[in-house]
Image (cartoon, grey):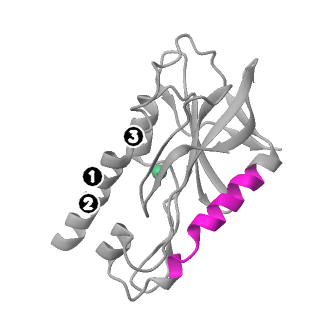
Amino acid sequence: MRALLALLACVGVGRWALDTRSAHAPHPTPHAPPFAVVVLPRAVRDSMRARWEENNRHWDELSDVNTLTQMLGTGKPTQREYLGCLWGTISRDTLWIRGASAAHDLKQLQFAVAGSCDGVAQFVGTWHTHPYRADSGGRALKERELSRRDLETFASARDLVTIVMWDSDSLDAAAKRRDGTLLHPVPLAVR
Ligand SMILES: [Zn+2]
C-alpha cells in the first residue's frame, strides 16, 4: 500500500509539473458570455476519436513492465495523453465547437500532456485524452472524468470549455460561468 501511495503521488506531481497549458495563456477572457450547453459536431468528435485511438495503442502490451516504467514511458511504445485545441463561437446559450486542431509544442507522456494553443483563431478551449491503464490482471482501467488537476488547470486558463475523451465514445466536459466558477459536467451534445 505504501508503494501504491507513492506511485499515486508521482502521477500527481508529474501531471502538475507538465501541465503548463495555463502558463502561456493570456489573462482569462473578461465577461465571457455564459452558455449552458456545448455542441460538438459529429465530424469533430470523429477526428478526436481517431486521435484517442492512435494515442491509446499499446496500453495492453505492458503487463510485463512495472508501473513506474510505464509511467516514465521508457522502453516499449506506450499509450500517451494527447492535447488538442478547440475553436468555435457562442450564440445565445450555446457554445458551438467548429473544429479542433493539434496543440503546438506538444509534450506527451503516458499520463500527462502539455502544449500550447496560442494563435488559434476563435479559440474556446482544449481537449485531451485519458488513455487506458492496465491493472495487474491486464484489464483496462479508465479515468472516466476530468481529474481534480485537470479542473484546477482549466480554472486558471483562458479556456471557456475543456473536454476529456476517456474512451472512444465517451466524453466529459466542464465550462466556466460568467463569474469564473466551474460548471462540471456541462451538458455536451454531439450532432
Ligand atoms: Zn486529464
Q: Are marks 2 and 1 in contact (CB under 8 Å)?
A: yes
- Residue 84 found in image quarter: top right
Q: Is residue 57 magenta?
A: yes
Asked if 1 appears above or below 101 in the picture, the reply is: below
Q: Residue at x 44, y 38 (%)?
A: 21
* Picture coordinates of residue 169, whole percent (x, y): 70, 60
* Disc 1: which residue: 13
Q: Are marks 2 and 3 in contact (CB under 8 Å)?
A: no
Q: Is residue 101 magenta?
A: no
Q: Earlier in the sequence, mark 3 or mark 1?
A: 1
* Picture coordinates of residue 116, whole percent (x, y): 51, 38
Q: Compare residues 151 and 121 and report the one nearer the observer.
A: 121
Q: Which residues are magenta?
A: 45-60
Residue 10: mark in rendering? 2
**Picture quarter with the N terminus:** bottom left
Calculate the distance from the C-alpha at mark 2 to the C-alpha at mark 1. Answer: 5 Å
Asked if 130 appears above or below 146 in the picture, the reply is: below
Residue 20: mark in rendering? 3
Residue 36: mark in rendering? none
